[in-house]
Amino acid sequence: MTAPMTVTQKEHLACQYAIKLGPWLRFAVDQGDAEQVEELIGGLDQQQLMVLAVVLAAEGPAPASRPDDGLIDETAVRRVLDGQSVPLSPLEQSVAAKEMKRRGWDRRDILAALRVSRKRFETLLSMPEQPEQPSLFDGEQRKAS
């Protein structure tokens, strides 16, 4: 009788599954091959599936924006206004773009800070205001040129 696997051993095994299965799973999903997907992951336990999900998520490109949930993360918007590179949802990008423009930021600086095109910037400016949070930045100073 073999001894039960330790957590470390299980994690190592799960990572091995993820490394071997990842490319095949991505291919099967891209091809819409449900049978192949089932064959690849059907025998994995919960821990192996969780590690696979984390490894696959980490392999993808970092998103340029967060999914839009209808809420505004004021801290994230303020961090972008302070020059940090933080993914924002489309709604947060709109709030940040309008605030940057209000503060007198140069268009090129806004495009660079938000990592958006001129066309996307114009779209962000045309998005409707959020009535629930009409004055996130009242009283804050304009950016010095």
Image (spheres, rainbow, N blue to C red):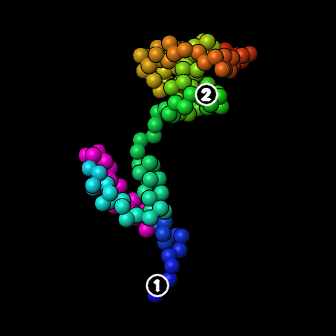
Residue 70 included in the magenta stretch of the image: no
Asked whether the residues under the numbered discs 1 and 2 touch, taking CB atoms below 8 Å apart as contact, a structural biologist would say no
Across and down, in percent, residue 50 comes to: 48, 57
Q: Main secondary structure of the magenta part?
A: helix
Q: Tell me the residue that label 2 is attached to.
A: 72
Residue 87 position (above or below residue 25): above
**Which residues fall within the magenta stretch?**
13-32
Distance (Cα) linking label 1 and label 2: 53 Å
* Residue 83 visible, this angle: no
Residue at the spot 54% in from the left edge and 70% down from the top edge: 7
Judge left or right: residue 140 versus residue 32: right
Nearest to N terminus: mark 1 or mark 2: 1
Residue at the spot 68% in from the left edge and 17% down from the top edge: 135
Going by the numbered disc 1, the residue's amino acid type is Thr
Residue 19 included in the magenta stretch of the image: yes
Across and down, in percent, residue 3 comes to: 50, 83
Does dot 1 land on a helix, a strand or a loop? loop
Across and down, in percent, residue 57 comes to: 44, 48
Quarter of image, res 43: bottom left
User: In the rendered view of the protein, which quadrant contains the C terminus?
Assistant: top right
Going by the numbered disc 2, the residue's amino acid type is Ile
Residue 98 position (above or below residue 10): above
Label placed on residue 49: none
Residue at the spot 40% in from the left edge and 64% down from the top edge: 44
Instruction: Count neighbours of disc 1 (C-alpha within 10 A) and say few if under 14, some if 14 to 19, many if 20 or more.
Output: few
Does dot 2 land on a helix, a strand or a loop? loop
Return the residue nearer the eye: 108 or 52.
52
Quarter of image, res 40: bottom left
Q: Tell me the residue that label 1 is attached to.
A: 2
Instruction: Count neighbours of disc 2 (C-alpha within 10 A) and say few if under 14, some if 14 to 19, many if 20 or more.
Output: many
